[in-house]
Structure formats: structure tokens, C-alpha cells
Amino acid sequence: MSITRRIFLRSGALAMVGSSAVPAFLTRTLFSESEAPDSKGKKLVVIFQRGAADGLNIVVPYAEKNYYALRPTISIPQNQVLDLDGFFGLHPSLASFEPLYRQGHLAIVPAAGSPDTTRSHFDAQDYMESGTPGNKATVDGWLNRALQSEDQCTNARYRMEHTAFRAIALGSELPRTLAGKIEAISIGNVLDFNVGGRGPAQAPAGNAFQSMYDESSDALLHTAGESTFEAVKMLRSTDPAHYTPAAGAVYPATPFGNGMKQIAQLMKANLGVETAFTDIGGWDTHHNQGSVNGDLANRLKEFSEGISAFWRDMGDEAEKITLVTMSEFGRTAEQNGTGGTDHGHANVMFVLGGNVKGGKVYGKWPGLAKEQLNESRDLAVTIDFRQVLDEAISGTLGVTKPEIAFPGAQLRKDNFLGLI
């Protein structure tokens, strides 16, 4: 196989996946650690739980007497809750999260959510992805704007030469979260590199990605894009189908599990990934939600084991990663007549990372007494989800201007929870 340095970005954007299939001299001499784009920058992973997850049965306020009164058949029995701090505990299907919490890597933020009170899945997801609750006119996403703000950062610790893989989403379409001025790509499957462009209308495999650079009048950009596209083809030649997760990590054999594995694979390839987005559906539990077992329990097992496998798989590189989870809203505090829960308000967010001050449940608990509930039916929001995200992008991407990522939110760093 004829290989020249032309296939690699000057910034050293590529180290081969499946390096055992690559001549040893390549892995030793392509670039030094100081040249690799990931050597300075940290990475942010965002996971969206689509369908409105039931935060009250995910992180259980088992010491709150009203919890069991409101949920006589779907509550999690106290003797099966995985205790966190004497008041809150994890659903038993989140057992793989418990060691991450004990090790101080996982932080938990209950009663988090949007200040907008819509109960529409579509509107609520749109507001959270745009980062502008209540404003339907916003066309780009908060994470894309965060990357724009990162480009204005003067702290050299966060600056790096960006590659075409700077912002990626696992899926056939680019999510609203990453829509905007900064180029981002959606990747349907690492195995065939079905690489899409900048929005819902996807081109055939790889065409949109390549044309994004072919049409550029900027000679340097054109050259970098051409080299990166050739690097993608080179990556395919290393047989990514035989990627083996490290440290015995086992991902769920589901679309979400596969998505988390592919994010790890792309990050390990040292392609210059700074931000990655994926989602997991199936959280709309109106009927037969279950308690320790059931639909929610099954989804939680997949969710937690996919994230835990990713953390294990990344090894030492996990120290550079911050992972945040979010869902459009929570569920009603009281179970309904069909053994489920309906659309609610506040939810729970997880923050996992090497720099995260985990092993703690953050924020203010509003209570579940009727007079404490939102509209007498939902857990009230005490933490704006944008506050959590702002803290994540500040500590990970070096963003110093939250008004760019979250216009109108009036976020202040002195209100940070101290997550990072």
C-alpha cells in the first residue's frame, strides 16, 4: 500500500484505527503527541433522551414520603434503590452508573429543565436543542454556537487546529443541536462512512462531505478537505468492522450502544473530534412503565451500560471527556390510570467526566407536596438546563461568552453549581 504524508492533515489529524493492521513505522512517526489535535483540547459528548424520561424513577427521591404516595405501583421500593446520599438513589437498572458515582466521575442534577412549560415533545426538544426556550425563530443549535464562541477564546489551552471531524453526530441527519455556521457532519455508520452534510437533506455516501470542500474557493481549505476525505477512505481500509473496545468494554447490541461505540472509535482515531452528539429514544412511558422491571428499566439498562462501556473503552482518554445527558421534560409526579406517567416538567441530567466533581447530587430539591409541584402535577424546575450546559462548555471547550451559546439566558458564572 502506497502511503504518503499527503493523506494526513498537517495538524496531525489522523492516527489509524485498528493500528495492528497498519505498518508499525506509520504509528510511530506520523506525528508527535504535541502535534495531535486532541493533545490540547478536551471533548464534549451530548446525549439526548428523546421522549421525556421519567426523572423521578431514574434518580429516586426515596426519602421523600410523597414519592411513594404518588406512585403506589410504579415506584422503586426503598430496599431496591441504589442509595446515593441518604435521600436520593439510582434505579437498580443503573447499576453500572454506581461505580462512576462512587469514583467521583459522575454528577447528578435532579429538578433540571427548561423554563418553558410546553408539554409538546416537538416544541420542547426544539427549544432545548436551539438553547432558546420559547423562541421558535432560532435556526441554529446551542452547541454550534458554543463552538463559535470557542473560536473567540484566547486561552491557548483550548485552541487547536480544527478538522472536518470537529463536530459529529451519529445518525442519518444532523440534529438541531449542531446546526449553524460551524461545519458539522452526521455519520450514519462508521463501517460504510455514510457521511452526510449540514442538514436533513443527505447526499449519497460521502458526496456531501467531499463537496463541502471541493466547492471552496479557499485553497487551504480545499486542500485540507481533500486530505481529510482521503484520510476517511484510508480509515475504511483499516477494517473498522474489526474494532475491538478496550479494557473488556461491552456495548449493548442496540443502535444506541453502537452509536456510543462509534463515537469512541472516532475519538480514538484522533481525527480531531471536539464534540459528539447522539440520542436514544423510547422514553415516552404513558402505559405500563413498570417499576424495578419493565419498559423504563430496560431502557435505563441500555442507556447506562452504553455510557459506562464508552467510559471504560476510552481508558485514559476519558479524562479529557465531559459527557452530558438531557431530555426534553420529565413526567408527572403522580402515576396515571394505565400504570404510566404523562408529560411533566423537571427532569434529571447526568454529567460525567474526568474533570467533573462527581459523587454528588447537585441543586435544590423542590419537593413533591402538592403545593410544591408545578401546576399541582409536575416536579418543579429549580435548575435551568442551560446553566448545566454552560458549565460544561466553559470547563470543556473554554467558552467564556455564554450569551453566544445561550442568548437571552443571562447566565452567570457565580451561579455555577461547581460541577467542573
Image (cartoon, rainbow, N blue to C red):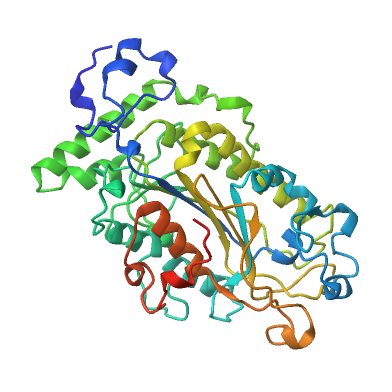
Give the x, y percent position of residue 145: 33, 63
For residue 326, which quarter of the picture? bottom right
- Residue 184 visible from this viewpoint: yes
Residue 22, compared with residue 290, is above or below; it is above
Horizontal side of residue 30 vs 19, given as left or right: left
Horizontal side of residue 37 vs 239, given as left or right: left
Residue 259, compared with residue 338, is above or below; it is above
Horizontal side of residue 20 vs 251, given as left or right: left
- Residue 54 visible from this viewpoint: no
Give the x, y percent position of residue 34: 28, 31
Residue for point 28% across, 25% down:
32
Toward the viewer: 339 or 365?
Answer: 365
For residue 383, which quarter of the picture? bottom right
Residue for point 19% across, 32% down:
10
Toward the viewer: 249 or 206?
Answer: 249
Residue for point 78% across, 64% down:
87
Give the x, y percent position of residue 278: 51, 50
Quadrant of the drawing holding the N terminus: top left
Residue 261, compared with residue 95, is above or below; it is above
Toward the viewer: 152 or 356?
Answer: 356
Horizontal side of residue 138 vs 97, given as left or right: left
Give the x, y percent position of residue 151: 25, 56
**Total labels drawn:** 0
For residue 341, which quarter of the picture? bottom right
